[in-house]
Amino acid sequence: MDMVSHTVTNLIIFVLAIYVGYHVVWTVTPALHTPLMAVTNAISAIVIVGAMIAAALTQTGLGKTMGVLAVALAAVNVFGGFMVTRRMLEMFKKKTPSGVSAKANLPQGKLSEAAEGKESGVGK
């Protein structure tokens, strides 16, 4: 293993990670997209914590700058992920036409309960 430099080994691992990541992301079914986004948001939050620790422990200006940059980019990733997840969840909500109350979407038996002001499980 001494014949191959560590830089080449790391470059090969990096290229393979890109290849595997590309195929994993593009083969995810739409039903699994939202849970996958939640997991990537959690991973990015861990990256933020690690970047803050790394930035705090470095002694050079370059190290601190790279740590702050890593925190900023991971924060953008987290907030963007939450925005995309919210938009994905809104796509699955039932849309009511304007001027129609939400009571119009209730099943027939629930409509009379809603008119009477009864709600199952509330106030019991």
Image (tube, helix red, strand yellow):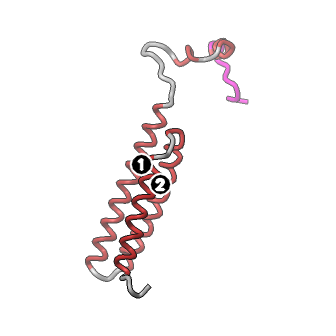
Residue drawn 66% across and 23% down? 119
Q: Quadrant of the N terminus?
A: bottom left
Sequence-first disc among 1 and 2: 2
Q: Is residue 95 left or right of residue 55?
A: right
Mark 1 Cα-neighbour bin, 10 Å: few <14, some 14–19, many ≥20:
many
Residue 63 location in percent, x, y? 31, 76
Residue 111 location in percent, x, y? 63, 13
Q: Quadrant of the C terminus?
A: top right
Is there a contact, CB below 8 Å, between mark 1 and mark 2? yes
Stretch in magenta: 115-124
In this picture, is 94 found above or below 29? Answer: above
Residue 100 location in percent, x, y? 48, 13
Along the viewing direction, whichever of 26 and 43 lies nearer the viewer: 26
Residue 60 location in percent, x, y? 28, 81
Q: Is residue 50 magenta?
A: no
- Snapshot quadrant of residue 62: bottom left
In this picture, is 62 found above or below 97? Answer: below
Q: Which mark is residue 40?
A: 2
Mark 2 Cα-neighbour bin, 10 Å: few <14, some 14–19, many ≥20:
some
Q: Circle 2 sits in a helix, a strand or a loop, which is it?
A: helix
Residue drawn 47% across and 54% down? 40
Q: Residue furthest left?
A: 61
Residue drawn 45% across and 58% down? 20
Q: Which mark is residue 81?
A: 1
Query: What amino acid type is highlighted by mark number 2?
Result: Thr
Q: Residue furthest right?
A: 124
Query: What amino acid type is highlighted by mark number 1?
Result: Gly
Instruction: Give the Cα separation between the discs numbered 1 and 2.
Output: 8 Å
Residue drawn 39% across and 60% down? 18
